[in-house]
Image (spheres, rainbow, N blue to C red):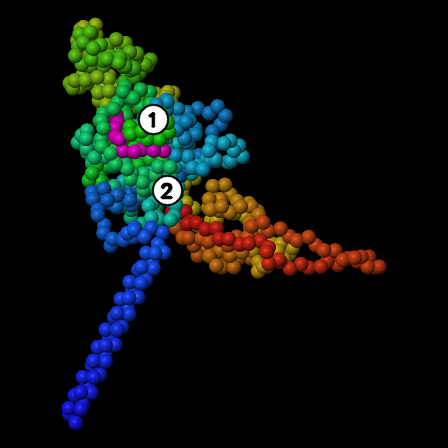
Amino acid sequence: MKLFEKMRQQKLMSMALMLFTLSVGILIGTLLNTQVNAARDQTAPDATPLTVPRLSALGNDFTALAKKLEPSVVNITVDVAPPEKGAARGQAPDDNSDEVPDFFRRFFGPEGGGGGQDVPEAPKRQASGSGFLVDRNGYIITNNHVVENATKIRVRLHGDPGDYRGRVIGTDYETDLAVIKIDAGKPLQPVTIANSDSVQVGDWAVAIGSPFGLDATVTAGIVSAIGRSADQLGSSARAFQHFIQTDAAINPGNSGGPLLNIRGEVIGVNTMIATSGRGSEGVGFALPVNMVARAYNDIIRIGRVTRGSIGVSLDRSPQPEVTLRALGVNHGAIIEAVSAGGPAEKGGLRAGDIILGVNGTDVKDGDDLVAHVADTPVGAQAMLSIDREGKPLSLKVTIADRSELYKDRPDIVGESKPKETITSKAEAPAQVKFGFRPRPLTEQERDTVVNRRGVMVTLVEQDSFAEEIGIQNGDVIDAINRQPVNSLDDIKRVQEKLKPGDAVAFHVLKNVTPPPAAAAPRSGRGSRTTVQTRPALDGPQGTYVSGILPGR
């Protein structure tokens, strides 16, 4: 009996082994046949398919830098009123009207605009630039030419779908800098600044900004030169601008963004480029951050930058060293003209005098003199060492406020504008306002709307939230954030639940027009009846129009 059972088990095992071997053979044959057929059907049978490798982040210093700086670099969009006919410099936002001569141009990029076509009915123009956070409370540094003449400033943080209203704290024409502020309702991540005096030619340089409106764009290059002065750049630079030159790509929209070292520290503010066209050709200029810090500290303290002046014009010889040597000195600044009634005239200075020193410190050249005087407190007295026709002389002058001394010279210190122009418009309202005027629908208008509810927009306020997101006169709004709307009271109830920074979605019907009334034949008694119509299934179609309420 045991032998029989043993033989039976061996027979079953043999059969199972045979079945398994057969199954494996069939499977292998099927696979081989499938591959042969696939190869036969493949367009390129001798080509090897590509295999995507497993995810592996390479990473490098630039990768870490970009991730670190993304939250701190902002996109700035401004509304600019159309320039008046024959308006002076700076009225239009694009480079062609910035009156920066030919080769050198300050850049921030226009948006939209139909390729330069005339649109006379357009109430405003839009342009964009860049900036960077320097304080967790929302203070931002950018270029003055980005926000100059703006009627509204909107700031967008990377990764944040909402826009924040910006207000101007102060500007400085002579360095082309501006400080603006947003109230985001949360701590923000500021940049870290470097000491730009430590920058050397050949150092890595990284630019981050919004060229052509493409935010958080990172480009890299090296520092090509340092100390590019107004004399070297001609009339495109101003007296207090000495630039870091870089070949990192800087394009329209980069203006106001940071130039960084390889550690991610700000070394400058991207301001202009040299180009024969309209884009980067590898010659960009950034204002050193040490100069920026001085201007920023003055602006947050008193709203503007104060500089000393003595009221002289200096000789700008193309070869100042040779000129000075010919006049018998090896350093100094030659006075070309003296302003009438200014500190220099009152102190006895004359055209042709050479200023050799200020308060015992030698003056190298004209730029060095301007820097020394500018940093001397307004109202202080300065002792000037003079060479007058080969004879040494000491004269004492009282330092004046440069902006007051040249207030009638906008070409030197810029135009004086009331600060409230932008500040008052940029401040967000205490309560949420949409910025449109509604009215109830008429019975005939309701007949065209499937759910027979909604309000008609009769007026959209200029520069309002409604205008920004695209609500137009004649639109019918039948719901806000899924809440049915049938009256002004319904809208107010929705507004009461919202706060700045909230997302709002309006369900809007376009092209709502009342149907024509169908008249029945007149009866013998002279009466007339109308036939009510039902909304067609292919009537006005709804769509959502949405946006983020302006920040506080």
Residue 364 image offset from top left, x and y in percent? 19, 17
Residue at the spot 23% in from the left edge and 79% down from the top edge? 16
- Among numbered discs 2 and 1, the one appearing first in the sequence: 2
Residue 219 image offset from top left, x and y in percent? 28, 37
Image quarter where the N terminus lies is bottom left
Please give the range of residues in magenta: 242-252
Query: Closer to us: mark 2 or mark 1?
Result: 1
Residue at the spot 30% in from the left edge and 33% down from the top edge? 249
- Amino acid at circle 2: Val
Q: Is residue 344 above or below residue 94?
A: above
**Residue at the spot of label 1:** 275
- Amino acid at circle 1: Thr
Query: Does any portion of residue 19 appear in the rendered image?
Result: yes
Residue 212 image offset from top left, x and y in percent? 38, 37
**Residue at the spot of label 2:** 155
Residue 282 image offset from top left, x and y in percent? 29, 29
Instruction: Kindly report the secondary structure that dominates the magenta region of the rendered protein.
Output: loop
